[in-house]
Amino acid sequence: MNNNNKQKVVRRIDFETSNNIALRVDKRKSKRAGSIGFKIFAYVFLTFIAFCQVFPFYLKLIDSFQAPETIPNADILYLWPENFTLANYWTAMNVSGFWMALGYTICHTVCFTAISLFIAIIVAYTLTKLEFKGKKIVSGLLLATMMVPGEVLMIPNYIIALKMGINQNVFGLILPGIVNVFGIFLLKQYMQTIPNSVLESAEMDGCNELKKIFKIIVPMSKPVIITYVILTVVSTWNEYLWPLIMQSSGSPVQTLQLIMYKFYPGLGNYADGFVRSAGMILITIPIITVYGVFQKYFLSQNNIAGMK
Amino acid sequence: MEISVKKRRIGKHRQALKATGLLAFPMSWWTIWFVIAFIAALVMSFTNVTLAKLANGGEIEFTLNNYIRMFDIANPRFDQDYWSAMGVTIVWTLVMTVGNNLMALLCAFLIYSIKKGQKLFLGLLFWPSLVSGVVGSDVTKMVFGSQNSSLANQIVMAFGGEPIQWLTSESYALISLMIMPFLLGFSTKMLIYYSSLISIPNTYKEAAIMESKSQSKVFFKITLPLMKNAVILNVILSIIDGFKILGPMQLVTQGGYGTTSEMLYIYNTAFQDGQIGRACAYATILFLIILIFTIIQRIISGKEVKSIE
């Protein structure tokens, strides 16, 4: 019990930058009677907002449980399905190339995350731990690209992808963004805190650069790497604009977001809508799972620093 | 001594070689997709290039027409649609910047002031930012459905109003697109405010409380001024995001009923009409607008980093 408490305190300090003593003093102060009304208001308001956020998705979930032959009453908001069934999930998985799209999406997400992480590690390492002329210029140039929103480059990138001939396969989704400047600076910020002496002693032992990177730097930057991976996995999984553009050039590559966006198989009655809801829930489940498992990384200081 | 200096010099030379080797591929790839692309966008904005001309090798001329059409009101081909898209974007940006930031600040402060369940509420309020645009827009479509049973109409009817055709009327379409992002889109900003709040030393507030100042006075006179940097940063991030808005317009209303945003107009001009040159000119103007705000943001977050150090 005591041990558990201690752990909580430690985690808390980890999470908050304020110092421990101040926190304790503050706790005592807040026991004053005057703030009880305010506290109740805080809990009620926060719960209300959380409820407002969840409720539309709950309605979507209910919609996905409706039996396919249900004809919903146009005057009633269903808070519980009329005839509960999971059949829509089965249907959603077996129409219009769901499995193919799943394969493409997983390939896109995994390859993009892995390659961009690899490149980000190497570039961040070079820019923090190696001495060479023009280092500042390279950093400055990379930083300057963060000022150009990706949306502005969407048209020329489309043409480049066409000219390279990668628009007809999944490489068209993966390759354009693999030099991820955001990732490079996220990792760079963290690697700057790793002392150089560690690397010097490794050099004495005769390690080459790649060994230094993967045996020393990578294990030491684990938290920031995990943060980068989950952020990238989520954003790649959710991406729809670039795949849509690639598709407009005649690419056969379907992603889950794309097939769900254009999901009108014509199953009759209201079944399309129910199956569509089921599909929307299906493609959100992985994201929510990742969030459930890695929540503390989403809420970590690394992530917050990255947002700036 | 001499040897070590020599060694270090050799070491430096070797490091430069290694750095070149490690950076060669990433930097050249980056040059293709960022530098060349950026220059290409600028150059294309001064031409009459179209998708068809690119595919079939038609004649491409340099012209200022793309910009003239945007800014010359007297021109018979003056681009009215561009400016109405700009108007929609500015309205969206204003509403979202004010709405999201007030919401984020309020929630961050409330979470900060409760002592139990801080992490629970942070977690509960953060997940909506992870929902994809496609799913979010599908939920928007359902909530703002035109039939009586949709959630929005149920609420309106509960207050005694008439059901509204939300997404298919000029006066309500944009509002109904705004409500879901207003409710769901503030979570990252909330996190920034929260981290700024917990970094304020409590001694400041204690001093104020000892002088028997009220809670609200402490907040407005002490806490908020100390959070100035976070507020400015969040506001600018919201403005940048606002100008880039595309998802809800494209996925929910397809730009109909007065909801075409700047980015959607660029997208449609390029990929539906095939007018790449014109789209690049629009994109260049958008880039300049965003650039101004990004530079302000860089200066501020640079200052903040310094103040932490």
Image: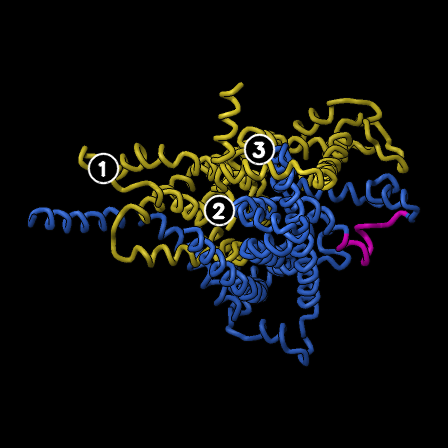
Q: What secondary structure is found at the residue carrying circle 1?
A: loop
Magenta-tinted stretch: B163-175
**Which residue: 46% across, 63% down?**
B40
Q: Is residue A117 above or below residue A248?
A: above
Q: Quadrant of residue A96?
A: top right
Q: How is the image coloured?
A: by chain
Q: What secondary structure is found at the residue carrying circle 2?
A: helix
Q: Mark 1 or mark 3, which is nearer the start of the sequence?
A: 1
Alpha carbon separation for disc pair 3 and 1? 37 Å
Residue A186 percent location from the top left of the image = 43, 45
How many marks the image carries: the answer is: 3
Amino acid marked by disc 3? Tyr
Residue A173 located left or right of residue B135: left
As drawn, the residue found furthest toward the front would be B211
**Which residue: 7% across, 48% down?**
B1
Q: Which residue is mark 2?
A: A306
Residue A254 located left or right of residue A214: right
Q: Which residue is mark 1?
A: A208
Alpha carbon separation for disc pair 2 and 1? 30 Å
Q: Which residue is mark 3?
A: A291
